[in-house]
Amino acid sequence: MHPTEVLFLGKQEPVSLPVCDHYAGAEKLMRKSLQLQQELGPVFDITFDCEDGASAGNEAAHAQLVSSIIAGTENRFERIGARVHDSGSSFFEQDIRIICQGAAKRLAYLMLPKAESLGEVRSAIDLINHHANLAGRQALPIHVLIETHGALADVFGIAALPQVESLSFGIMDFVSAHYGAIPSDAMRAPGQFSHPLVTRAKLEIAAACHAHGKVPSHNVTTDIKDMALVAADARQARSEFGYTRMWSIHPQQIRAILQAFTPPLAEITEAAQILHAAQRAAWGPIQHQGILHDRASYRYYWSVLQRAKQSGIAVPEIATTLL
């Protein structure tokens, strides 16, 4: 039996996404990120930005550009999403209508920023479904940016929505929403990993995602020159806060994030050996190198292989039938 037939009985299989989400707003940067995705493969997602990362005053034309590129031949892997304006903006429905009309069937997801509540997210999804359905797309995946007090208060309800597959932390807007009560150095390391209000938000988002099988996506590292810092942020987000995905805002950050989130080769090999033995034992308990394993640990090692696959790492041959 396949792991998904055994390890998640009575539960929905957790969402699995590439570990890096790269944002690009200008056309030049969009096409550069596409070239890199074609070079590396679908090991990272690209989010075309219609909101903060795009220039103001040309919103309709920009949405048309986003739609045309997603629908075009350069989108080889169909792992491109789009961040639209927030639902309070006069451009919100325009973004959705234009992008869905031209590219709904090839769109990986839509990102909703600045949501204030569970009710607002539900209403936004209803509007998205209206335009996506008109374009022949059902249940378009939704990502939600958690960066307001209201969204954080409703984070478990938002994560539970069926179409939502990922929540991201918007650290800069979140810190700014405290109007100076949180110092600016909490927007970056080391403060972002130590200030109690910021760490509370990060942990709530991660916990909500894991409770409902969704993907928590860590905030950006604003330093675009120090790749060691980017990698260190990614490792800390993964190992201490439970994040399985992270934003990139510069092409150079992508490889650093991929490397930080990729399981070590020794762990991939161990996971393959354990799951191969478990499958041969009809998923009953086994011992591996003197350690007892059962379905609880099998779920962990299955996630290791999933992360390796999403990062483009070849798994040992004995595990190829498990993926």
Image: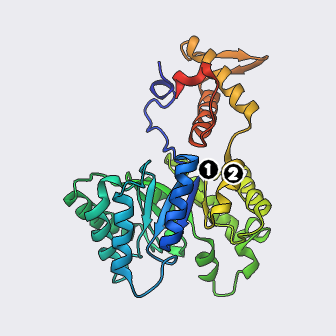
Give the residue at x 37% y 81%.
Answer: 59
Tally of numbered tags:
2
Q: Whole-percent x and y of residue 224?
A: 71, 69
Crowding near the residue tagged with mark 2, few <14, some 14–19, many ≥20 C-alpha atoms within 10 Å = some
Question: Which secondary structure lies at badge 1?
Answer: loop
Residue farthest to the left, as pictured: 134
The one of 293 and 45 positioned closer to us in this rendering: 45
Asked whether the viewer can see residue 111, the reply is no
State which quadrant residue 157 falls in. bottom left
Alpha carbon distance from label 1 to label 2: 6 Å
Closer to us: 276 or 195 = 276
Residue 319 figure quarter = top right
Identify the residue under disc 2.
238
Mark 2 secondary-structure assignment:
helix
Q: Is residue 4 above or below residue 241?
A: above
Name the spot of residue 290 as percent of width and height, x first.
79, 16
Foreground pick, 206 / 128:
128
Which numbered disc, 1 or 2, marks the residue that appears first in the sequence? 2
Left or right of residue 191: residue 105: left
Can see residue 314?
A: yes
Q: Where is residue 134 shown, x and y percent of the image? A: 19, 60
* Pick the front one: 132 or 202: 132
Q: Relative to 293, is 299 above or below?
A: below
Three-letter code, disc 2: Arg
Report whether 103 appears left or right of 232. left
Mark 1: give few (<14), some (14-19) or many (20+) Cα within 10 Å. many
As drawn, which residue projects farthest toward the top? 281
User: Whole-percent x and y of residue 241?
Assistant: 69, 55
Residue 244, numbered circle: 1
Q: Are marks 1 and 2 in contact (CB under 8 Å)?
A: yes
Amino acid marked by disc 1: Thr
> Which mark identifies residue 215?
none
